[in-house]
Amino acid sequence: MTSADSLSGYTHITLEVINSLPDKRLVTVIFDYIRDQVGDDYAQLAQVLAALPAGFSLIYQLYALNGEIASGGFNQYFFNHLDTYAPQQAEALALIGAAEHHQIFQAAHRLHAAEQQNEALQKLYREGTPEAFAATYRLTGLGEWDDAWYALDKEFDAALAQFIRRQPQLFVT
């Protein structure tokens, strides 16, 4: 069942929908389905995720994690405080079988923890301005982990799609 004003194109996610989608579209449809449910009110995101089957929260966490890293690296991830969800993200990476991503994620977190001692970097993080954000790139070593993450880009998408295919009951609405 589709809807013209739906980002996902689906009013429900069924086994038939999951089975009919190619891997390249599957994760995007799941993520867009979440956005369809949330609409313009992201204040209700937690409530929407709690009401959906468990797999949606996992996909949201990983899609957001990967999107943040893809657009600005681990430095942006930490600057924007997405690491608030690090325990859920680490668990989700393990659940989908993304062992190399999990290792990179953990290594980036260890480096970030070590960089807590860099007062100049921490001052910029606390400042929180676009100018401060740009300046943080000169002081962090997280770029090494960005490159490692980017090298596995296709594996990440494939792991997400395969997880959905192995556990479709976690996504049926």
Image: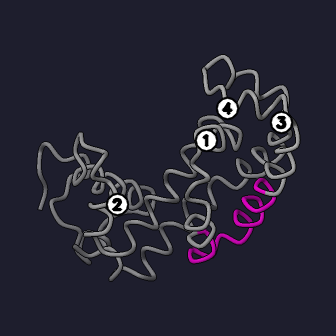
Q: Which residue is mark 3?
A: 140
Q: Earlier in the sequence, mark 1 or mark 2?
A: 2
- How far across and down, in percent of the image, does residue 53 sit? 31, 75
Q: Earlier in the sequence, mark 4 or mark 3?
A: 4
Q: Earlier in the sequence, mark 3 or mark 2?
A: 2
Q: Amino acid at mark 1?
A: Ala
Q: Is residue 104 magenta?
A: yes
Magenta: predominant secondary structure element?
helix
Q: Residue at x 22, y 54 (%)?
A: 37
Image-based side of 107 in relation to 72, left or right? right
Q: Amino acid at mark 3?
A: Thr
Q: Amino acid at mark 4?
A: Arg
Q: Which residue is mark 4?
A: 126
Q: Earlier in the sequence, mark 4 or mark 1?
A: 1
Q: Nearer the viewer, mark 4 or mark 1?
A: 4
Q: Which mark is residue 30?
A: 2
Few, some or many C-alpha atoms within 10 Å of disc 2 (few <14, some 14-19, many ≥20)? many
- For the residues labelled 3 and 2, the Cα–Cα distance comes to 34 Å
Q: Earlier in the sequence, mark 4 or mark 2?
A: 2
SS at badge 3? loop
Q: Which residue is mark 1?
A: 70
Q: Earlier in the sequence, mark 1 or mark 3?
A: 1
